[in-house]
Image (spheres, rainbow, N blue to C red):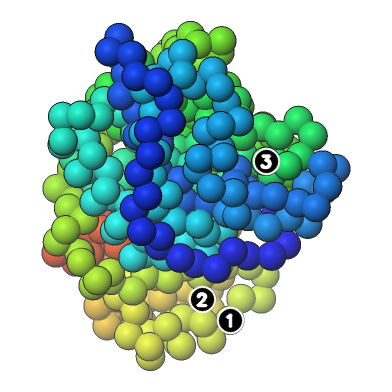
Amino acid sequence: MAAASASLTIAAMNTSTTTSTSSALPRIAVLATGGTIAGAAPDATNTSGYQAGVVGVGQLLAAVPSLATVANVQAEQVASVDSKDMALALWTTLSQRVDTLLASGEIDGVVITHGTDTLEETAYLLHLTVKSSKPVVLTAAMRPSSALSADGPLNLLNAVTVAGSAQAKGQGVLVAFNNRIHSARDVVKTSTYAVDAFHSPEIGALGWVQDGRVEFQRAVVRPHTTATPFAIASIGAQWPDVEVVTSYAGASRVAVDALVAAGVKGIVVAGTGNGSIHATLQTALAEAAAKGVAIVRSSRVGSGHVMRNGAASDDALGFVTAGTLNPYKARVLLMLALASGHTTPAALQNVFDTY
Ligand code: SIN
């Protein structure tokens, strides 16, 4: 939604305690990364021509005095980016910072403020890499902080409330948005403008938060955080190059051939329907698979799952299927799997069936 992008800066850690301390309250670290929640426009009716990531975390917290009643909040400005510009290096910084804070024994939970555009990717990355069972909750906003009826303040209060709740422990990374609590694995952005912009298609939200009350209605089943083998430290600066291509009427092989020539390690295809692929594109992808490029079939549909289509196709072509992961989350998992040494179609399918 942002018309202009904030420059991508990974700011120096800037720590400040912003609420008075009460020993009865949970200790929550708020890590700010930018986004529309930290956006500002010249006037209050402007919700499309603003600049994302320009309002500092101190100002975000000051807009929500009630935070002092739910947590002792410590704030850090980790970055100030429009999340369309999210970088893999910032994912590394964020994951490591979350681990450090939660291991310190002085923090009970972490809230990350983020742009909505790539929130689902960052959330899933952290869900797979953070090594703590303490709550980690991402939140965001669809309207800049300067807007009439800005949604950021309530989303931030709700996220801190969830992060401080006993029920959120062990649920993996969560997204608190518009009163609902979602699993990082399932949640996707589904609207370009509505404040009810995040849903978990097929599966639904985990629960809700309202007026200080947190209720979970189901638990997260697939392994996450401490139960995965994925470690951000082992990736370092060497993220495997994985790209996404899309299938559509008249699709060509130009993009796949260019990616293979560039040396990519994996390609996720956003297929039609149950991850079906235009014949021309499929031939190019099969040739790429034969050269050792990992090929994962996902779907551009937006809900449902992609199932293996048997010996005649996926087995013969060396393709992997993404299940319920959309193409962008499938890319996150494929990068982590490749970085962890899973390279054969069988090993990768096992990863996709597990996480
Ligand atoms: C962003 O993703 O940083 C901008 C858009 C938003 O947060 O809604």
Query: In this view of the protein, can residue 211 be seen by the observer?
Result: yes
Image location of residue 99, percent across then percent down: 21, 43
Front residue of this view, candidates 326 and 10: 10
| Residue 252: mark in rendering | 1
- Residue type at mark 2 is Leu
| Residue at 52% over, 59% down | 81
Q: Residues within 10 Å of mark 2 (few under 14, many from 20)?
A: many
x, y percent for residue 60: 56, 38
Q: Is residue 203 visible?
A: no
Residue at the location (36% across, 59% down)?
12
The reply to whether dot 1 and dot 2 touch (C-beta < 8 Å) is: yes
Residue receiving disc 2: 281
Q: Residue at x 30, y 9 (%)?
A: 24
Q: Position of residue 225 (x, y in %)?
A: 23, 38
What's under tag 3, amino acid-wise? Ser
Which image quadrant: the N terminus?
bottom right
The label shown at residue 145 is: 3
Name the disc covering residue 92, or none: none
